[in-house]
Image (cartoon, rainbow, N blue to C red):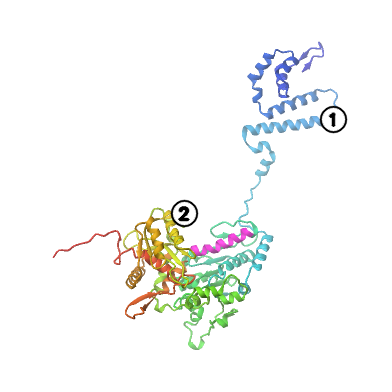
Amino acid sequence: MLRSPDDNVTFFDARREARSLYWRGWAITQIAEELKLKRATVESWKQRDKWDQAPSVRRCEDIVEVRYQMLVAKEKKTPHDFKEIDLLGRQLERLHRCQKYRETGNEADLNPNIEARNSGPKKKPRKNHLTPEQIDALREDFEAGMFGYQRTWWGARDERTRFILKSRQIGATYYFAREALLDALETGRNQIFLSASRNQANLFRGYIVEWVYKITGVQLTGESLVLDRGEGEEQPTIYFLGTNYRTAQGYHGNFYFDECFWVHGFRKIDSVASAVASQKRYRETYFSTPSTVAHEAHKKWSGEEFNEGRPKADWTKIETYHAALKDGRRGGDGIWRQIVTIEDALASGCDLFDLEQLRRRNAPAVFDNLYMCNFVDDATSMFPFSIMRPCAVDAFDKWRDYDGFALRPFGEREVWIGYDPDESAAGDSAALAILAPPAKAGDPFRVLEKIRIKGLGFDGQAALILKQLERYNVTFIGIDTTGVGKAVWDIVVKRFPTAKRIDYNVHVKTRMVLKAKQVIMARRFQFDAGDKDILASFMSIRAELTPSQRQLTYTASRAGDTGHADVAWAIMHAIDNEPLEGGDPSDNRATVEMY
């Protein structure tokens, strides 16, 4: 309200004063009485000007504004008045920013520091960066978790070339994934993993990513891991490659050749892949379980490759027997070799195995190959390594129509299932194989998936087979009905009436082996190169005479971690659905010639 100094008359904006009082909590009746107005008039202003719909910022602004004007209008101001005027001025500015933000939604209108902050050059977030403290934590965990034989590998990490022949399941993949990561972080050297397939190589990536996240909480990203070591430092990359040797060209760094005794065309791959470590600062590491003495990598292991082309008088003798290499030794060819059997692992502190149980569950020859680092002589095998290995492919790159992580891995395309039950008292396991049959004559069979089964009764085995009907478009199931297989078939056939029962005898086994060999020799069979147990399973099948000495049959050591034939028989049960002469099994048309 304003008062004239001449006539002592009060001037004021009644409508604005009424609104201000209302926003301060006065009732309409009280406002009308105070301002000597009709209640209906005040109520009309309230409705037309929508006092109740005004935002809280506007109401506060009005109250602060009234107080600010009152203090500014005072002729004699106290120090406290000046402080309050300054405070109210800042509040008015703040309320004005809030009001503008409501209109624009721009945070810079609310906080001017945001605009100043964003005006400068933006820093990219650091990707795959680990601090020195986090690297120390990784090294501490790494050193605390090593077994004795792994400490030997760590002590030999500066050897130019290491070649390790090892038992199954002693943690080599796990160890070398961690060793390579620490080397990359501490030295800046690239690391290159070469495996039988991309799926196998990605195991290393999985181990690295999982370990780093567990210890540091940092999530490493990227198909190849590019590590950020800070400005001015080398930024190493960890690559994960299959055995297509062309993919290794152009890289440089330490390289790790995983399961080198199981790859096809080892010498060609090795000649290219080893070139990535040509610089003297890089290191080579080969590690593998043994396959067959006929494998190309055996010449490198035995030193025969080193002596090739040299006069016999200049040959270097390389010791490759266990006693000489138990603790690791550098040979005359400069390669540091070691043999680590399961017994060596147990003696070095590894407590992950029950040795006696493994001996009971495996035939002696199988145990020696799997766990004692003895090579297999496949000269008498029906499916020697030389004919099996060309059938191995890098499924990750080659099979674009298959996604093992999808709910329907093969979409609506048909698959055939072969099942081999756990029928022997020797401790063998059951095996289920899922194959993609040829889409047209001449196309290959593809082993999309294999499942090993232990410890399930016949009902559990049947349930596992029937579960595949939810994941695949199954058009054929073949089940060996020997022993417990009959009970499995009885359950499966109730839901899948066309399930075929395979009653084993000499003629049936002969037909299946000959059919499988025909398919394999024609290169009409494919499996992922990382599935070493498929190779081992087929290689273990041999021909021998029946007890009557009148017929030839086919047998294998059916016990063991790889099953040594159970996977092969399961696959052959599915392949057997194709006629011996090939073609579509559903095509039963016959031709009659008249003479």
Residue that protrudes farthest toward the top in the picture: 7
Secondary structure of the magenta portion, mostly? helix
What residue is rendered at 64% in x and 20% in y? 49
What's the amino acid at mark 1? Answer: His
Q: How dense is the environment of label 1, judged by Cα within 10 Å: few (below 14), some, or many (20 and up)?
A: few
Residue 406: image tag: 2
- Quarter of the image for the C terminus: give it: bottom left
Q: Is residue 516 left or right of residue 151?
A: left
Residue denoted by label 1: 80
Q: Confirm whether residue 163 shows in the render.
A: no
- Please state the horizontal and vertical placement of residue 587, each as a whole percent of the image: 27, 59
Query: Dividing the picture into quarters, in which one does residue 424 lie?
Result: bottom left
- Quarter of the image for the N terminus: give it: top right
Q: Is residue 359 left or right of residue 471?
A: right
Helix, strand or loop at label 1? It is helix
Helix, strand or loop at label 2? It is loop
Query: Dividing the picture into quarters, in which one does residue 345 lie?
Result: bottom right
- Please state the horizontal and vertical placement of residue 28, each as a whole percent of the image: 70, 18
Does residue 439 lie above or below 560 as drawn?
A: above
- Please state the horizontal and vertical placement of residue 315, each as a whole percent of the image: 51, 86
What residue is rendered at 65% in x and 44% in y? 118
Query: Dividing the picture into quarters, in which one does residue 89 lie?
Result: top right
Disc nearest the viewer among 2 and 1: 2
What's the amino acid at mark 2? Answer: Ala
What residue is rendered at 47% in x and 54% in y? 406
Residue that protrudes farthest toward the bottom in the picture: 313
Q: How dense is the environment of label 2, judged by Cα within 10 Å: few (below 14), some, or many (20 and up)?
A: few
Of 400 and 340, the residue lying toward us? 340
Of 300 and 292, the residue lying toward us? 292
Sequence order check, earlier mark of 2 and 1: 1
Q: Which residues are magenta?
A: 198-214
